[in-house]
Image (tube, rainbow, N blue to C red):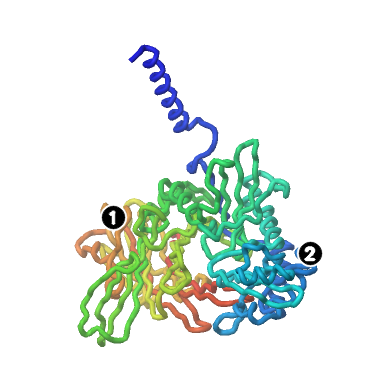
Amino acid sequence: MKRETKISIAILVVGFFAIALYWFSDNKRGYSIEDERLVLPKRGEDDFSSLREVKEYLEDIKEALVKTDGVVPLDSSEIDSKAQEVQEFLLHNRAFLSDTRDAQGRLEHNDMMTIRPAIVSALSSQTKALCQATLCYQAEKYNFVTNTTTRAIVDVKNRKLLELKRFSQMQPDISKRLRNIAKVIALNAPQIKRELGRTPSLKDMSMANVRGSLNNSPCENENHLCVAPTFSYHNKEEALWAIVDLSDLKLVAAKWAGLGKTTTPSCISERSFQNREIMENYCQKDTLYSQDGWSLAYRITGSDGLEIIDATFNGQAVLKSAKIVDWHVAYKAKEGASSLGSSESYVAGRRIEYVKDKNDSFRFGYNDAMGCPMYSTSVVLPFNTPQIESIVKDGKEIGFYILQDYRNPKWPMACNYRYENRFEFYRDGSFRVVGVNIGRGCGENALYRPVMRIDLDLGAESFYKYENGLWQKWLTEQSDFQRDAKEYYKDKYLYKIENQKYGYFIEPNRGEFNDNSRGDNATLFATRFKSGEGDEDLLTLGSCCKLDEDGVERYIDSHESIDNQDIVLWYVPRIQNDARAGHEYCWADTVLEDGKLVVKEYPCIVGPKFVPIQ
C-alpha cells in the first residue's frame, strides 16, 4: 500500500472518530431525550372553569343537554351559510343523533366539530357520483363519552343524508372554538407562566389544534381529546409544549424540548412524563423539606409507598421512618369452601389467595403494594409526584401535609384501586400517619387493612397502654386490639411512647378528625427494631385474607424486651367498605352528569395521631 493511501485512510479514520466523539459528547448543541425538561401541574391548579371561554362552553354543554340531544352546535361565526343549513338538518336527524344516549337513555356530551364542503377522499364511489351533480357537505361530530367520531355526508340542496359512518376510538379535527379554549387554558395555566417567567402572548403560540390522542396520546387517558399548543423560541432552539385535555378542560403536562431535534408530545404519554419525573427525583433520591419548625426528607419506595425519614421538630428528633408497607384486601364469598384449603394463584400481577373460613364460606383477595413506576413489582403505582399542601382549620393555617396518590391505571373501573399516603405535620409538634382508600375494588364486601410501620427517633424508648385508669408499661413485644379498648386517657389517647425527657401520646382514629371516618378498629404491634424487619423495602407481608393474622406476627417474640429500646410500631386499621346509596365508604363510582362521565369519590381515611406530651 502506498504511503499516500495510508495517510488518506488514517485521516478518514480520525475524521470518523472526531464525528463520533462530537455526536456522543455532552457539549454538542441541541437536545436529546434525556435533556428534555418536564413540567407537571401542582395540586389544585387544574380548575379553569372561571375563564370566560371555558365558562361559556360549560354553560352551552348544559343547554345542549336540554335542547339539542346533547350536541353542542358550531357557532354561526365558524361556518358558512350552507353549513348552517346542514347543521340545522343534522340536529333533527334521528340517524345522526342515534349515538348520543347511553343504554339507559341518558344524554352524552357531543360536539359538532366541522362542517365543510365534502372532499373526494371522504366519499364512497356511490356518494361521489351523486355529489358530482349536487352540492355535498361533510359534517363531523364527536362523542366525548364513547370517544367516537360520526361523519355525515349531506346533499345540501335536497336536505338529504347520503352517508353516515361512525369511527370508534377515533377523533376528528377540532372546532375553532375548542382550539381557542386550548389556547386560553395554555395562556392562563399557572405552571406555564412560572416556567416562562411571564404571562405568554398569543403570538408566541402555534399548533393549538394539533391532536395528540388519536395515536399515543399525550394524556394519561388515551380516550381523552387532547391537543398540544406550543410556545416556540427559535433563538434558543427550544419549545415548550403545553398539553391540554379538552375532555376535562385542563392542562395535564408541559415539556421543554429542542426544536426539530426530538420527538413530539404525541409520541410521549403523560404517564411516561410522570414515570421519568418520579423515578429520577423521588425514587432515586431523597427530597429535603422544611416548614413550620419541621425538617424531614421523603422518598417513594420500591414497594412500601411514600416514606418519611429523619424528621425533626425545632431541632429535636422525632421520626426515623414512617410508611404504609401494604394494603391487605379481602372479600367474602358465601359458599363453596368445603373442598378448599388455603391456596393461591396469580391474576394481572397480583397474588390471589383463597382462604377457607367458617360455615363453608371462604375469603379471597390479595396484598397491594405501592411503589415506584419502573423496576418495581408493585401493581398500584404513583399517579403523580408527591404534593405538599397546607392544613387549614377555621380559616387558619395550622400545618402542612405531604401526599402521594397511587392508582391502578384503569381506576375507577371495577377491580382497580386508588390509595393515598398522607403524612400530616402540625405547628404544635404533633403529626399523623394517614392512609386513604378511594376504592373501587372488586366488590361491595371488601375488608381493607393498611399496614403502617412507624419508627420514632426518641432514643431509648418505653411504650405504654392506658387501661384501668393507669398507664401500663409493655416490657416485651406484643400486640393489642384498639377496637376492644374500653377507656381512653382524656377520652383521646390509648397509647404513649416516650424516653426519659419527652414523648408522644398516640390518638387512634375513632371518627374525631372530621374526615367522615368510621374509625380505625386497628391492631397495634410493638416490636424491637431489628435490621431486615421493614427498615428497607418489604416484600408482601402476611396473608390478605386470614383475618386473625396481619403479617406482623412473624416479628413478635414474647420474650424480647422493648423497655428502653428502639421500638417500632406497626398499626393496622381494619375497614369495611360500603356501596349502599347514601352510605358509600371506601368506594368510587362513575356516573353520567351534565352529559359527561364524572367520577364520584367516597374515601375512607384512617390512621393515628401522635401528640407531644407536655
Compared to residue 527, the image places residue 544 above or below, namely below
- Dot 2: few (<14), some (14–19), or many (≥20) neighbours within 10 Å? few
Vertical comparison of 363 with 199: above or below: below
Q: Height in image: 577 above or below 564?
A: below
Q: Is residue 532 left or right of residue 241?
A: left
Q: Quadrant of the N terminus?
A: top left
How far across and down, in percent of the image, does residue 469 sit?
37, 73
Residue placed at 43% from the left, 65% from the top?
Answer: 408
Q: In the picture shown, does residue 360 fall above or below 440?
A: below
Label 1 belongs to which residue? 529
Q: Position of residue 372 (x, y in %)?
A: 40, 55
Q: Is residue 167 left or right of residue 472?
A: right
Residue picked out by circle 2: 77
Marks 2 and 1: which is nearer the front?
A: 2
Name the side, left or right, on which 403 lies relative to 458: right
Report whether 23 appears left or right of 98: left
The location of residue 569, given as percent across then percent down, is 34, 61
Q: Identify which amino acid the numbered label 1 is placed on.
A: Phe
- Picture residue at 22% right of the left edge, 80% below the top: 340
Numbered badge on residue 435: none
